[in-house]
Image (cartoon, rainbow, N blue to C red):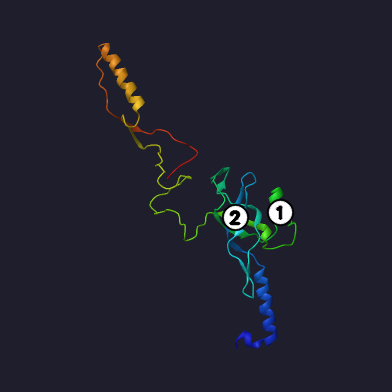
Amino acid sequence: MNPDEMMPPNLKIILDEVKADIFSTFNCIQIGKISKVTSSEQTVEIELQIKRLAADGTSTAYPVLVDCPYFVLQGGGAYIDMPIKKGDYCIVLFNDRNIDNWWSTANVADPATARKHSLSDALAIVGLNPKTSPLSMDGTWVRILGTNGPGSEAEAARKGDAIKSTMADDATFWTWLAAAAAVLAGLGVAVPIPTSLTGKITGGSSKVKIG
């Protein structure tokens, strides 16, 4: 027998209404748009992009979320600093419990209030895009782009990579080399002047490795 048929009709209606009421105030994950960035506190203000829909079909906007910590990819003291700005989209997560005490002290502590999944405990993960504004990605390379965007990037050099220098690469050096050769020639010393130099990179950063 269907469980719904075992319940008195009025009880099912009541339970459905209770369930709908619970979910109407239950915050889990939302899509947001950043309206203000406070880098000194690593927080943002967020405008939620999906409105609250009432049972009668009307909708209302959520209030602006303030003092929301935003996620930074980091570990061991190293981190990636992104120029987060107004207008960026983000995933908004609502913590299970009140985060005020941890946020203020970084200590393990009891929650300051009994609130759960509240709009006041939002966390932002920046880096989401709607279908109307996808990033330019072809999946061919690992790329880290600055604010200048695609087309401005250059290839990274590593220890062991071959290098080559010509007049087009370093005009100052090659002009100096030609002048030095001319001086030596004036002294009767014949020195062949190369048109290019090749070699390998012998050193690099021991802190950052690119594979």
Nearer the N terminus, badge 2 or badge 1?
Answer: 1
Structural distance between the alpha carbons of marks 2 and 1: 15 Å
The kind of residue on which mark 2 rests is: Ala
**176 above or below 127?**
above
Q: Quadrant of residue 201?
A: top left
Q: Is residue 14 visible?
A: yes
| x and y percentages locating residue 185 in the rendered image | 26, 14
**51 above or below 180?**
below
Q: Quadrant of residue 155?
A: top left
Could you say whether the residue bearing mark 2 is in a helix, strand or loop?
Answer: strand
The kind of residue on which mark 1 rests is: Asp
Q: Which residue is mark 1?
A: 100
Figure quadrant of the N terminus: bottom right
| x and y percentages locating residue 156 in the rendered image | 41, 41
Could you say whether the residue bearing mark 1 is in a helix, strand or loop?
Answer: helix
**184 above or below 108?**
above
Classify mark 1: residues with Cα within 10 Å, few (<14), some (14-19) or many (20+). some
| x and y percentages locating residue 188 in the rendered image | 25, 11
**88 above or below 182?**
below
